[in-house]
Each structure stands twice: as structure tokens, then as C-alpha cells.
Amino acid sequence: MQLYGMAMSGNCWKVAQILRLTGHDVAWIETDTATGATQTPAFLALNPNGKVPVLRLNDGTILTESNAILLHFAEGTAWLPPPSLARTRVHEWLFFEQYTHEPAIAVARNLISWRREAHLHTERLAQCATQGAKALTIMERRLSQADWLVGTTPTIADLALFAYTHRADEAGFSLHPYPGVQAWIDRITALPGITLLPRPA
């Protein structure tokens, strides 16, 4: 399999993690969105949306959208509960990650630590700060009472939210007000096979 992604991207990190954790070999193809690599005719033929990650399976099938790929490879493993209320809870957290958490924390990280343009986006970053604090507070409410986001073992919900949360400092967030989230980060980091998202140079 071939995975087109950016090493600094939490969305791409998620896909690489679930592949490794489920025993799949994959060739990484670094694809830098900042240089226009996702807008070439060749890349757009893979994903007309012009975004990474993109995964090409051994039979040539193309998969896109990080959480969809998480669900695909977690099926039948301990990372995804069987059809049940627990699985629905996993889906809830995956949608939360993409619509509440990621648009605040990932966007702020991109502007502050990747593009280094914080001074150009003060209003946008103020919005991110408010929304990101709300997302972390929601996570803290759960993680102050439970080890994992769903059930008693880690799931892809934890992988999805870990991606940008463990680098929240790069987005201007302190995790000190969220001890449950901090302890959860430590638990995930200690799991076999988990790597950390690289920091910007």
C-alpha cells in the first residue's frame, strides 16, 4: 500500500498509526500541501478534493478522509467495538474531532507553528482559542472519569483525538487545566506501537 501524507499532519498520523497497529505494511509518500503537491493533475486524479491523506490499497483502490480510513482498518479489531451503542459513541467522537476539535486546535497549530503567521490571523486565532478550550473541556469531562473516550479499552476515537491534542501546545493551548486529558495522553503514549507527531522544525 502507498500512503500519501504530510509527516507533520495529525490527520495523516492517524492513518499511519492504525495501519501499523493492525499489522499493515505501507510505503509513505511525503506530499507537501504547502508546495502545491496536492493540486497537481496526478494527485487530483487520486483525490479530487486535493487533500491528504490518500491511501492506495494493493489492488489500486483509493481511500480518502482520515477517519473513514480509521474505521475501515479498525473493523474486526479491538480498536472498534462491534455494532452497538459503543460503536455509535466512537462515531460521535470521530465527528466531534472533525467538526469541533480539529477546526480549532489543528487550524491554530497550522497558523502558529507551521506557517508561523499568527500575527496575520489574530481574529481567527481568538476564535480558535475559544473553540479549542470548549473542545478540551468536553474531553476533560469524560476523561476525568474514565481512562478512555469509549468503554474500557482504547479505540480509534482515542487515536483520532490524540493526534492534535498531544501537540496542543503548538496551537497555543496549555493542558494544565485539563489533568484528565493529560493523564489520557500519557496512557496513549505508553501503548505499544504508538509514535508521536513530529514537531515543526
Image (spheres, rainbow, N blue to C red):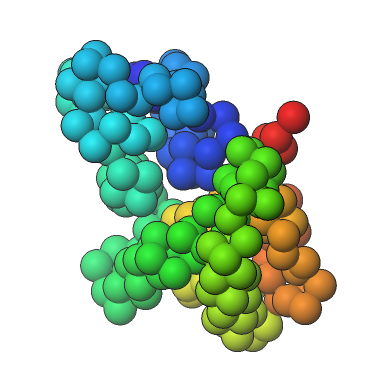
Image point (64%, 45%), residue name: 117
Looking at the image, which is closer to me, 65 or 81? Answer: 65
Among the 4 quarters of the image, the one containing residue 137? bottom right
In the picture, measured across the screen, residue 63 lies left or right of residue 172, that is left
Residue 196 place in picture, x, y as percent: 67, 41
Taking the spot 30% from the left edge, 24% from the top edge, the residue there is: 39
Query: Measured along the vertical axis of the image, is residue 51 above or below residue 182?
Result: above
In percent of width and height, residue 7 lies at 56, 29
The quadrant in which the N terminus is found is top left
Is residue 87 among the parts visible in the rendering?
yes
User: For this view, does 164 lie left or right of residue 53?
Assistant: right
Q: In this view, does 83 lie above or below 21?
A: below
Q: How many marks?
A: 0
Q: Where is residue 143 in the image (x, y as percent from the top left)?
A: 63, 77
| 16 on left or right of 2 | right
Residue nearest the observer in this picture, 174 or 112:
112
Residue 122 falls left or right of residue 65? right
Can you tell which quarter of the image residue 43 is in?
top left
Q: Which of 140 and 9 is in front in this view?
A: 9
* Residue 165 at x, y percent in the picture: 62, 59
Q: Does the rendering let one see residue 197?
A: no
Which residue is located at x 47 percent, y 37 percent? 12
- Residue sitting at 72 percent across and 64 percent down? 173
* Picture quadrant where residue 97 is located: bottom left
In the depicted structure, whether residue 197 falls above or below residue 136: above
Q: From the image, which quarter does the C terminus lie in? A: top right
**Foreground pick, 157 / 22:** 157
In the rendered image, the residue lying farthest to the right is 176
